Amino acid sequence: MRVTPRNVTGLVDGLEADGLVARAAHPTDRRATLVSLTPRGAEVAAAMRRDQDGFAQLLFRDVSARELDAFVTMLDRILGRIGELMLPATGTAHGAG
C-alpha cells in the first residue's frame, strides 16, 4: 500500500481519538501493538459497507452478469498493468524522472 509506519501511526491515532479503534499490547511480542475495532468502530464500518454495497447496486443495476464479468476482467488487467509499471522501491512509474 506504500504507506509509511509514521502515516499508519497518524491514522491509528486519529481513529483511536474518535473511539473507532483501540490499541493493546501484543501478548508475545513487546515490539508489536494490536489494533482492533471498538464496538462503535464496528458499527461505523458496517454502515460504510452497507452504503458502499447500496451504491454499487445503483451503479451496476442495469449491467448484465456477462457485462460485469467483462468489466471485472478488464479492470483486473488494468490494475495488474499499473502494478507492473510501478517501481516497488520508489513508487514512481517506469520511465519517469
Image: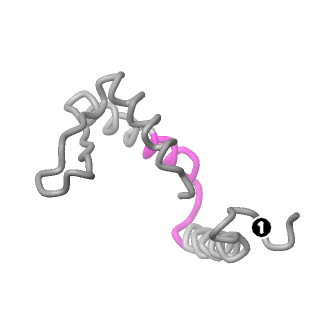
Where 56 falls versus 23 (above or below)?
below
Query: Horizontally, is 39 left or right of 58 in the view?
Result: left
Q: Residue, x 19% and y 31% (percent of image)?
A: 39
Query: Horizontally, is 75 left or right of 48 in the view?
Result: right
47 or 89, nearer to the observer: 89
Give the x, y percent position of residue 4: 53, 50
Give the x, y percent position of residue 80: 63, 75
Q: Which span is picked out in magenta?
A: 52-66
Q: Residue, x 24% and y 42% (percent of image)?
A: 36
Dominant SS in magenta:
helix
Q: Name the residue carrying label 1.
A: 93
Element at label 1: loop
Q: Is residue 55 magenta?
A: yes
Q: Residue, x 28% and y 34% (percent of image)?
A: 21
Residue 14 sits in which quadrant?
top left
Give the x, y percent position of residue 1: 53, 58
